[in-house]
């Protein structure tokens, strides 16, 4: 038992480290890392190392867990100021646009491939959702107008909810109610999911602000736990758990929470881990020997999706949102081409597979092939398409790179110093700190308000200082601050450790 666990940990750790290294390679070549992870899974599978895995039910369950983390991270990192202007268009794309896409793809599959209407619409439903992980990973590397990027990211975060409901509905053996009743149920689940997510986010925001947790590391765990709570509360209430996750993430991500940067960093790490595990698992599930037979159906369905369904859904949604003039035909054309598909359609294809829906095996293989082909084609052509359409952002904007934590890349450290009661720092002026060249007090927080200090700023008890120091002088600056804390103004007559060296 122990030996088997050791081998499993060895293989798992090796796969994880290879997947992390693959991110660097995929970023350089401009291909979404999901393809690398899928290939790793296929290499581990029955046609590679011989690991046999065919549990569609387990894949669906773990896939949903991974999607919760990915969607939660997307909500936490979404900025409300950017999201608000495009919220209407994105919401219509995620609902009306999905319906148009499902109908168009379903009609093509029914008449061209000769499948029955239920299975044809199931093809359309599975493929109508854009993938949040693929969109986030690809678009954030391109120089595009913020409105277009925000629209695609918000759409990818919201359209999973209605699509999951459609796939589950079409995967059942028979419809128990008329279509209008099912439409009311879907509407209720979306509205209730949004309401539950917002409620959990608002309550969680208040709790995190007022809870005095004993460790800073507990805040990221609590924040992510709240998004999972939103999903669970939505699912138990027969509402859309995925929409609840996204709504809760947006509320929490735009709040002034304690240790907010740590929360976002923790969520980002969890999302990466979820993506790696999900894509490798999906690669394990597929049978490579059966993929060549799915090539023709995949090309037919993919062609209908890219050439007809997606452009029509974007055009109809823009008209409904009255955003066609603001987007223009160039913006609509890019939105049509940039609707990336990734792991989400493959995960959705495991729902009918786990329920033994007739034709589910061919559906899963066709979706898998389609995702690989169109991800390679679309991801590599987004930048040229944006340039050809003339929608790239101005060159001046690309010269300024704003990062949340660039200090490590710049070989610098951020020191935080609190002027505690009894500290000799109180009463000392900034210029009397005599910090080494390469270290500077960049911010003082006093009575809840921050300001940039000047040389004559006098420190007070209760102040918090932020000092940026290069890696070479970080230790010198820290020793100097300790010396001033012990000796006060007299520290100028002492060495860095407070020892008299006259």
Image: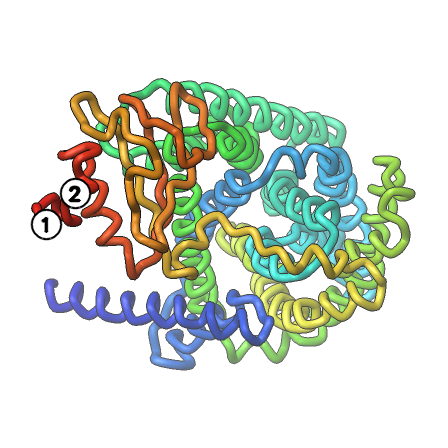
Q: Residue at x 71, y 75 (%)?
A: 296
- On the image, the x and y values in percent for residue 151 come to 71, 45
Residue 319 occupies quadrant: top right
How crowded pointer 2 is (Cα within 10 Å; few <14, some 14-19, many 20+) is rated as few
How crowded pointer 1 is (Cα within 10 Å; few <14, some 14-19, many 20+) is rated as few
- On the image, the x and y values in percent for residue 345 come to 60, 56
Q: Is residue 68 above or below residue 418?
A: below
Residue at numbered disc 1: 502
Residue at numbered disc 2: 493
Residue 431 occupies quadrant: top left
Q: Is residue 49 above or below residue 170?
A: below
Contact, mark 2 vs mark 1 (Cβ under 8 Å): yes
Please name whichever residue, 65 or 333, is drawn nearer the observer in this view of the structure: 333
Q: Residue at x 58, y 71 (%)?
A: 31
- The CA distance from mark 2 to mark 1 is 8 Å
Quadrant containing the N terminus is bottom left
Q: Residue at x 22, y 53 (%)?
A: 475
- On the image, the x and y values in percent for residue 366 come to 63, 67
Which structural element holds mark 1?
loop
Q: Residue at x 24, y 33 (%)?
A: 215
Please name whichever residue, 222 or 98, is drawn nearer the observer in this view of the structure: 222
Number of marks present in the image shown: 2
Side of 299 relative to 34 (left or right): right
């Amino acid at each position: 038992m122990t030996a088997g666990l050791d081998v499993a940990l060895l293989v798992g750790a090796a796969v994880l480290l290879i997947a992390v290294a693959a991110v660097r390679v995929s970023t350089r070549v401009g291909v979404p890392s999901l393809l690398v992870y899928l290939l790793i899974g296929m290499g581990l599978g029955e046609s590679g190392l011989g690991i046999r895995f065919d549990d569609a039910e387990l894949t669906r369950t773990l896939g949903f867990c991974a999607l919760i983390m990915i969607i939660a991270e997307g909500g936490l990192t979404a900025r409300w100021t950017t999201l608000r202007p495009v919220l209407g268009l994105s919401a219509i794309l995620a609902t009306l646009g999905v319906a148009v896409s499902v109908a168009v793809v379903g009609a093509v599959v029914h008449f061209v491939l000769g499948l029955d209407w239920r299975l044809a619409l199931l093809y359309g439903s599975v493929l109508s959702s854009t993938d949040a992980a693929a969109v986030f990973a690809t678009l954030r590397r391109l120089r595009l107008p913020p409105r277009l990027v925000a629209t695609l990211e918000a759409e990818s975060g919201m359209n999973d909810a209605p699509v999951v409901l459609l796939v589950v509905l079409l995967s059942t053996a028979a419809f128990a109610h008329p279509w209008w009743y099912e439409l009311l149920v879907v509407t209720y689940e979306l509205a209730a999911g949004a309401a539950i997510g917002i409620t959990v986010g608002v309550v969680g925001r208040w709790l995190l602000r007022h809870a005095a947790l004993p460790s800073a590391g507990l805040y990221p765990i609590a924040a992510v736990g709240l998004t999972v709570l939103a999903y669970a509360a939505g699912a138990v209430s027969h509402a859309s758990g995925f929409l609840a996750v996204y709504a809760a993430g947006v509320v929490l991500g735009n709040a002034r929470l304690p240790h907010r940067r740590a929360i976002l960093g923790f969520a980002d790490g969890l999302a990466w881990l979820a993506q790696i595990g999900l894509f490798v698992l999906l690669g394990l599930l597929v049978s490579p020997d059966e993929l060549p037979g799915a090539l023709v159906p995949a090309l037919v369905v993919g062609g209908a999706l890219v050439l007809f369904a997606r452009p029509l859904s974007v055009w109809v949604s823009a008209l409904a949102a009255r955003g066609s003039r603001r987007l223009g035909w160039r913006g609509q054309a890019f939105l049509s081409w940039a609707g990336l598909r990734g792991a989400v359609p493959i995960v959705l294809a495991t729902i009918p597979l786990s329920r033994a829906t007739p034709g589910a095996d061919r559906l899963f293989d066709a979706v898998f092939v389609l995702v690989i082909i169109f991800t390679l084609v679309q991801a590599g052509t987004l930048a040229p398409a944006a340039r050809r359409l003339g929608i790239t952002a101005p060159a001046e904007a690309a010269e300024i790179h704003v990062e949340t934590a660039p200090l490590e890349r710049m070989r610098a450290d951020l020191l935080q110093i609190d002027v505690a009661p009894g500290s000799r720092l109180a009463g000392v002026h900034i210029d009397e700190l005599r910090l080494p060249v390469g270290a500077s007090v960049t911010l003082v927080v006093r009575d809840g308000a921050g300001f940039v200090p000047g040389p004559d700023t006098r420190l007070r008890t209760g102040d918090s200082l932020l000092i940026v120091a290069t890696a070479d002088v970080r230790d010198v600056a820290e020793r100097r601050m300790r010396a001033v804390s012990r000796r006060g103004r007299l520290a100028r007559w002492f060495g860095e450790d407070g020892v008299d060296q006259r």
